């Protein structure tokens, strides 16, 4: 069944955005949605933006009477730890067990990063608990080849409102080859599941496109001094540097690479497209960095002006593009709950999972549907460059990352 965003909101109740009267909700009818994000550590600010996107959709649905008359409660869990300094896969696994152990939890939103996703997916599969991630992009999590590892119970439980690094990494390599005319590059990763994965796919496509890969190395997120590896890169003199990394290593890399090789072209994936990168590295270090997100860029779309105003009014902050994909992830879950409730069957994990798998809904970023493995049927990758705007705060993702355009798929 294809559900438009307007129809989805009808299923959820009357549109809170339109100011309709709140319908009656049956006493005691509620379900819980788990939300698992790294709210401690280097990516906390960006994770909070994601959390706020998801919560906004849930609050709107509850204000409109709840999906199918059900109140949606949230179980918000932090998978960041001070020991890791960022997301912690061990904590993510603990959080997955907490969600599975709570019989009222019928679906989940998150995680933010693929390292957490790989720790959670087998546990969620065994608990038949579907999750919709707004930002984790490792293709392994939804690849049939790894189904025994990440979905041992058989059915798809890991869904996304973003595309994967099977497109994000290669498409950035295409952008470097076609638009920046890069001839040589050095590749780094931060040893995490996300960083290694996106660096691998970028490197393979760069080589395919005739870009000389002059070396590959790693930056340890828990080490403070990257001077040795950066000096090695400087001496090799590649035209560009590409890094697959989360913010913990990314901030240090941005700062120190500017000190050692300020004029080199530098780029990364969505792990480098974060407020924490801007705030931690500052300017001029961040100036000129290219980044990608695994989704369409919607923040400048006039059609979203009302949504943007609602977000800012509610949270007193600007959203990120992944606030939008988080809102959309929540909308998918809410629509699934509403569909199950409308059918008259029990609103349980199995039914909600099936409804998520089958959902076709118009969201902020456009129509969303999933293939049999939980991946989006669209694969948009957006490219940005940091260009300092002194009229706005340093950590303002909306104004400091200038949208360049869509990175094209393989043109060879």
Image (cartoon, rainbow, N blue to C red):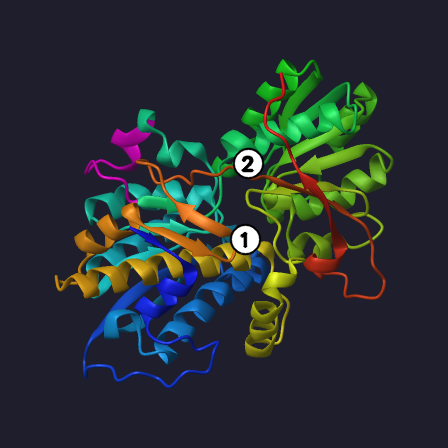
- In reply to whether residue 155 is colored magenta, the answer given is yes
Q: In the image as oriented, which residue stretches furthest toward the left? A: 345
Depth check, front residue: 182 or 179: 179
Magenta segment: 146-157
Residue 268 in picture, x, y percent from top left = 66, 38
- In reply to whether residue 128 is colored magenta, the answer given is no
For the question of whether residue 79 can be seen, the reply is no
For the question of whether residue 164 can be seen, the reply is yes
Q: Residue at x 35, y 40 (%)?
A: 374
Q: Residue at x 68, y 52 (%)?
A: 277
In which quarter of the view is residue 43 placed? bottom right
Instruction: Give above or below for 381 relative to 26.
Output: above
Disc 1 target residue: 85
User: Label 2: few (<14), some or many (≥20) within 10 Å?
Assistant: many
Question: Which of the numbered marks, if any, corresponds to residue 196?
Answer: none
Depth check, front residue: 264 or 355: 355
In which quarter of the view is residue 55 placed? bottom left
Task: For marks 1 and 2, give the CA distance.
Answer: 16 Å
In-image side of 197 versus 7 (left or right): right
Disc 2 target residue: 195
């Amino acid at each position: 069944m294809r559900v438009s965003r307007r129809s989805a909101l009808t299923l959820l109740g009357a549109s809170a955005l339109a100011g309709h009267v709140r319908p009656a909700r049956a006493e005691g009818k509620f379900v819980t949605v788990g939300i698992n994000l790294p709210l401690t550590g280097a990516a906390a600010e960006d994770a909070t933006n994601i959390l706020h996107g998801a919560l906004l959709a849930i609050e709107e649905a509850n204000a409109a009477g709840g999906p199918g008359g059900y109140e949606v409660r949230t179980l918000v869990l932090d998978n960041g730890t001070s020991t890791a300094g960022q997301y912690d896969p061990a904590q993510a696994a603990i959080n997955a067990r907490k969600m599975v152990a709570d019989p009222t939890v019928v679906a989940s939103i998150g995680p933010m990063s693929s390292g957490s996703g790989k720790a959670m997916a087998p546990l969620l599969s065994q608990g038949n608990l579907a999750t919709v991630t707004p930002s984790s992009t490792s293709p392994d999590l939804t690849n049939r080849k790894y189904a025994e590892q990440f979905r041992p119970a058989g059915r798809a439980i890991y869904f996304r409102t973003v595309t994967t690094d099977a497109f994000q990494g290669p498409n950035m390599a295409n952008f470097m080859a076609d638009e920046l005319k890069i001839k040589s590059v050095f590749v780094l990763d931060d040893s995490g599941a996300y960083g290694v994965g996106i660096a691998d796919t970028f490197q393979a496509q760069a080589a395919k496109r005739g870009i000389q890969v002059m070396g590959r190395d790693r930056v340890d997120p828990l080490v403070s001094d990257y001077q040795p590896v950066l000096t090695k890169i400087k001496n090799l003199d590649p035209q560009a540097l590409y890094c697959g990394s989360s913010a913990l290593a990314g901030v240090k890399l941005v700062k120190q690479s500017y000190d050692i090789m300020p004029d080199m072209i530098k780029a990364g994936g969505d792990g480098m497209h974060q407020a924490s990168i801007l705030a931690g590295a500052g300017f001029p270090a961040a100036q000129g960095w290219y980044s990608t997100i695994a989704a369409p860029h919607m923040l400048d779309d006039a059609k979203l002006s009302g949504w943007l105003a609602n977000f800012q009014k509610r949270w007193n902050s600007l959203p990120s593009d992944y606030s939008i994909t988080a809102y959309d992830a929540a909308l998918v879950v809410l629509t699934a709950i509403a569909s199950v409730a409308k059918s008259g069957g029990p609103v349980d994990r199995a039914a909600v999972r099936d409804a998520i798998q089958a959902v076709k809904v118009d969201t902020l970023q456009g129509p969303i549907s999933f293939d049999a493995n939980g991946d989006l049927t669209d694969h948009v990758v957006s490219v940005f460059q940091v260009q300092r705007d002194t009229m706005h705060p340093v950590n303002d993702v909306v104004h400091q990352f200038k949208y360049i355009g869509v990175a094209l798929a393989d043109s060879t």
